[in-house]
Amino acid sequence: MNSFYSDMQGKKISIIIPCYNQAEYVSEAIDSALNQTYQNIEIVVINDASTDNSSDVIKSYADKYPNIIFLDEKDNKGVVKSRNLAISKSSGDYILPVDADDKIAPTFCEKAVKILDSDLDIRIVYSRIQFFGFLNKEFKLEDFNPDRIIFNNCIPNTAMYRKSDFVAVGGYHDYMKDGWEDWNMWLSILEIAPNKEKCAYKIDEILYFYRQFESGTRSDFKLKKQNELFVNMIANHPSLYKDRIEFYRHILKTLPAKMARKKKLIKNLVMVVVIQLVVVIALLVI
């Protein structure tokens, strides 16, 4: 352990781990949180009414480690409400969410907190990502750009931010309960950031490990709802979209492909309009 941080204590970090039916993996997530080189840490693990033995696994850790706060919920709330509840029970200056089937490198907290402490303009710190499990390769992330993140998220859920910013933007919003709740909150933090160019910082090192499954990624289902989710984000962050020329360039660039996929529908709509015009003209002539 790093004695410097133990002596100095520094800002407190709350690592937030929501768990739903992840008994097989949650111990790895908790172990990765316990093994941090940064010392001033609490770990808030919330069991969202799992039907497996997740509660027993988490309780075994909470009974052993005094810096683990265990919230054992009996009614399923979903990830948005669970994460918000866990953060509301936390006492840290900084928040780091980690999903129950993922894990972080031992130096994640040490390196991220140093960056947040050194520059108040930086609001979010994340790292490069390594897939593990069914796939074992690096997941390539774009560098942060305030013009591009409005239509292409480059910041994973496992990123560190100030609890004061979480409170200021109202946390994760339930209108994004079907997905992208983390992306939506990054946009909320971007909105209140005075220096938008420096709002987020990527550590050029793999410090976050994202589990992959043979049956597909956990976010595949979101593709079915992505249009609805995107509309929700635009509706709730109008100032970011209306003032960004990159957004309009993106719409113009992707519109032809979307139009092609809806070619049959467009033809039918055109035919309806033509028929209506013919009827109007015929009535006028009569």
Image (tube, helix red, strand yellow):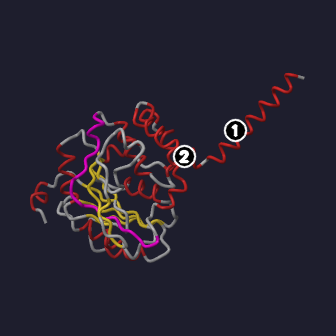
- In depth, the one of 3 and 241 nearer the eye is 241
Please provide the residue range marked out in magenta: 195-215
Looking at the rendered structure, the secondary structure element under dot 1 is: helix
Judged left or right of residue 175, residue 131 is left
Percent position (x, y) of residue 142?
31, 50
Q: Quadrant of the N terminus?
A: bottom left
The residue beneath circle 1 is 270
Up/down of 254 relative to 45, above or below: above
Percent position (x, y) of residue 161?
30, 49
Q: How many neighbours does mark 1 have within 10 angstroms: few (below 14), some (14-19), or many (20 or more)?
A: few
Question: What's the residue type where badge 1 is placed?
Answer: Val
Question: What's the residue type where badge 2 is placed?
Answer: Lys
Examine the rendering and report whether any part of residue 262 can be seen: yes
Q: Earlier in the sequence, mark 2 or mark 1?
A: 2
User: Which of the 4 quarters of the picture holds residue 6?
Assistant: bottom left
Residue depicted at 35% across the width and 55% down the height: 156
Looking at the rendered structure, the secondary structure element under dot 2 is: helix
- In depth, the one of 47 and 203 nearer the eye is 203
Percent position (x, y) of residue 146?
34, 39
User: Which of the 4 quarters of the picture holds residue 45?
Assistant: bottom left
The residue beneath circle 2 is 258
